[in-house]
Amino acid sequence: MVKMPTLYGTDPEKKRQEIKAYFQACYKRYESLFTLVSDERAYFQKADPLRHPILFYYGHTATFFINKFKLAKMIDTRINPHFESIFAVGVDEMSWDDLNEKHYDWPSVAQTQAYRDEVYEVVNNVIDTLPITLPITEDSSWWVVMMGIEHENIHLETSSVLIRQLPLAYVQEQPAWKECKIYGAAPKNQLLEVAGGMVTLGKDKDAKLFGWDNEYGKHEATIPTFKAAKFLTSNAEFLAFVNDGGYSNDMFWCEEGKAWKAYTHAVHPLFWLQKNGEYFLRTVTREIVLPLSWPVEVNHLEAAAFCKWKSSKSGVEISLPTEDEYIRLRDVSGISPYVQWREKRKVIADINLEEYASSVPIDRHQHGDFYDIIGNVWQWSSTPMYPFEGFEVHPIYDDFTVPTFDGKHNLINGGSWISCGNLATQKSRYGFRRHFYQHAGFRYVQSEYSESLDMDYYTTDTIIAQYCHFGWGDNRFGVENYPAKCAQIALEIMKDKPKIKAFDIGCAIGRSTFELAREFDEVVGVDFSARFIQEADVLKQDGVLRYAVPTEGELTALHEVTLAQFGLEKTKSKVSFWQADACNLKALYTGFDLIFAGNLIDRLYDPQKFLESLSGRLNEEGILILTSPYTWQEESTPKEKWIGGYKRDGENVTTLQGLEEILGSDFALLETRDVPFVIQETARKHQHTIAQMTIWQKR
């Protein structure tokens, strides 16, 4: 079986070969999963109406390597900019109330495979030539290599769920993906005592294995003695809930659960089928008579409803465990860490694809007094995803976890039969929307533990908070709010022109997007940073934004702003926010009357490519407004890509001259203006800058 390398060692070249073998095995294993698809038409169907067709996921994991290697400056050129745009984002499961119905012109399966083959060679070459020192740390390029591999391991699991949702006629069995054929009656579940004690979550920067940002930091809690189910909840146990009208009785369902039921018309778990009064289970490649001894697979909403039903039947309070309680249960069960159990030859759990490509009976793998503490299926918790104390994003993947700190994503624990690499480790933390289906079930508890998490938090990330204040705060020097002022000028320019649709590129926290929506029918805001987009979307959804700005040393000032206080409450329905690369925008971003790009061009890795793409996105006689202080820096833009601020043939070339050379054939320059802005770093330190605004009309 494929073994995840540690970050330590004494022989760098041996470690290089170990990581190369790991990459190759994981990459080919992912491709092997798609051999379960027997008809190419299936690649272009939405197995799940809330997610992309599976072709997207086949291309996405390869694209991730190229996009992250490019961002980390590990490679100089792209393989296919079009593929690296359409396959880049759009992975997180969408809710029924924010479904993106945009059409994408997907490539063929053969084209996607050819692209994957090219990426395979690029990654192998990077691994062969990249300097290596041990141990591998977060600031090493090798960390980005591991990031790409573990990212594909995540999609090995999520893609298997989507293949499981395809019509059975589109899938086939394969010897490498052997499913369990052990069935039987389910053992009777019972609650067993779990001794209380202290739990410590999180890991240090010197941990032996690669980890995602949310795993680092520290969280401690004292857990009182509680009771936990000996087994995972079986299909048989859940069937009693179904037969008792559990899905039709709203008293067991939260408001979100009732809304989900109304949308899906669910009357039983997604992977159950009813034929002639008998239940069947859809595995990845088969339909089998419902195996009563296997764990039920449900979303969080269904699991929580079962617990309320169970409480009503038993007369005691039954609930899903918190993350802390799961960790305490794991501690008392004696399960050894990943590095240790992977060294043993004996299969101790249905995990890491070490046993079957499916679930197994819930009484097959014993861990102390309990069963399936890890493996078989993931276990839903009642804990929303939250950051540990000391949480920091990784600059190469700053949006891995942050978008899930929204109170809508709950943690799952323990891993499933297909959880490989990082997903199988004891420190992993993954959160999904509560309506989402994974290979996930649950174990219930009887507990008096009260989890205390402050989810109504203030944004404290220094850079994000700084941009929040730049977009929505006041300053002490009488300089008008910059994004609001730019939007005001744009609306003045558009006074007698059509104001149907505007495009705000580099929208940051969205102030200019909302301001443009005062008069435009629709405004699309995009930014490269998902962290910025998340804050903008919080404003759109909740109408309120909270952030903490440093004042001096460790001291901060808390701020709360609302759309209502700026008279922007009615603009929420007219704006949308998306993560996007300005130098590699999707073709669907077109048909705009106005394009505004504020303080963007001198932060792009290829500003000329960006500028040359704008004409085709604007309607005839549309307006383009650019602002920038022209602060060219090689950290963000290679010097050969600067469009100004350098000498050519001994003569100065200004950015305005560069803009005229690039845009002149498609645009007429109407005017330029100076627009000042102030960025507050602390209470007594501010940056005062003057940007030049150039206003262009499409010829």
Image (cartoon, rainbow, N blue to C red):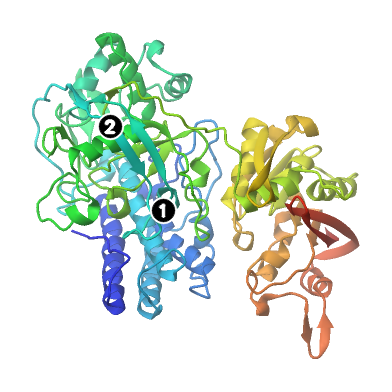
Task: Identify which residue, 79 or 472, lies in the foreground.
Answer: 472
Which amino acid does the dot numbered 1 rest on? Answer: Trp
Tell me residue 423's x, y (percent).
31, 49
Measured from the top left, where is residue 604 in percent x and y?
A: 66, 66
Horizontally, is 630 left or right of 152 in the view?
right
* Residue 568 visible (yes or no): yes
Quarter containing the C terminus: bottom right
Is residue 501 visible in the rendered image? The answer is no
Q: Residues within 10 Å of mark 2 (few under 14, many from 20)?
A: many
Label 1, residues with CA under 10 Å away: few <14, some 14-19, many ≥20: some
Q: Nearer the viewer, residue 490 or 193?
A: 193
Of the image marks 1 and 2, the number of the one nearer the N terminus = 1
The residue that appears at 42% across and 25% down in the rendered structure is: 264
Mark 1 or 2: in front is 1
Q: Percent position (x, y) of residue 636?
A: 64, 69
* Nearest to the observer: residue 621 or residue 317: 317
Tell me which amino acid carries mark 2: Glu
Relative to 281, residue 607 above or below:
below
Asked which secondary structure carries label 2, the reply is: loop
Residue assigned mark 2: 297
Say which residue label 1 marks: 212
Task: Give coordinates of residue 684: x percent, y percent.
Answer: 78, 53
Q: Secondary structure at mark 1?
A: loop
